[in-house]
Amino acid sequence: MKATKDITKIFPKHLFWDMDYSKLSIKRDKDIIIPRALYATTKDTFIKDIATLESLYSKQEILSCLKNTKERISNKMCVMVAEEYNVTPFYRYAV
């Protein structure tokens, strides 16, 4: 993982509207960055967005953050990530 990358050049500012965007650390704030990056993704942008996250984090870190986040990640997004990583689908909300 490369902790020296500038987060402000990787993800749009609107994803972090409620915090000081310039103070985010890729290493320290992965629990915020990973779910918010995927919150804004769509079926059309998923491959690009997941590749961007994979350039910063391991697949295990991405899965772990999504499974444990309090952010509002849709079940659909969780299923897309599970399919991408060939793991059992998981859900954020009861189905």
Image (cartoon, grey):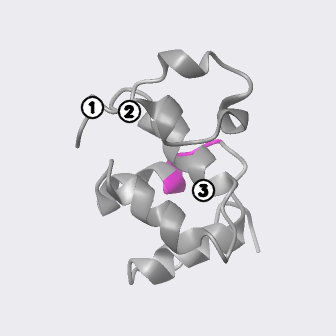
Determine the secondary structure under disc 1: loop
The answer for how far apart the CA atoms under marks 1 and 2 are is 5 Å
Q: Is residue 90 visible?
A: no
Residue drawn at (28%, 56%), measured in percent from left and top?
A: 58
- Identify which residue, 58 or 91, lies in the foreground: 58
Tell me the kind of residue under disc 2.
Ile
Q: Is residue 88 above or below residue 93?
A: below
- On residue 30, the disc is none
Q: Quadrant of the C terminus?
A: bottom right
Looking at the image, is mark 2 or mark 3 earlier in the sequence?
Answer: 2
Looking at the image, is mark 1 or mark 2 earlier in the sequence?
Answer: 1
Q: Main secondary structure of the magenta part?
A: helix
The answer for how far apart the CA atoms under marks 2 and 3 are is 15 Å
Q: Which residue is mark 1?
A: 3
**Residue 50 spot, x, y in % from top left:** 47, 64
Residue 93 lies left or right of residue 8; in this view the side is right
Residue drawn at (52%, 61%), measured in percent from left and top?
A: 49
Q: Is residue 88 above or below residue 12?
A: below
Residue drawn at (52%, 54%), measured in percent from left and top?
A: 66
Looking at the image, is mark 3 or mark 1 earlier in the sequence?
Answer: 1
Tell me the kind of residue under disc 1.
Ala
Residue 31 lies left or right of residue 21; in this view the side is left
Badge 3: how crowded within 10 Å, few (<14), some, or many (20+)? many
- Can residue 25 be found in the magenta stretch? no
Determine the secondary structure under disc 3: helix
- On residue 38, the disc is 3
Q: Which residues are magenta?
A: 66-70
Tell whether label 1 touches label 3 (CB within 8 Å).
no
Q: Is residue 37 above or below residue 31?
A: below
Q: Which residue is mark 2?
A: 26
Badge 2: how crowded within 10 Å, few (<14), some, or many (20+)? many
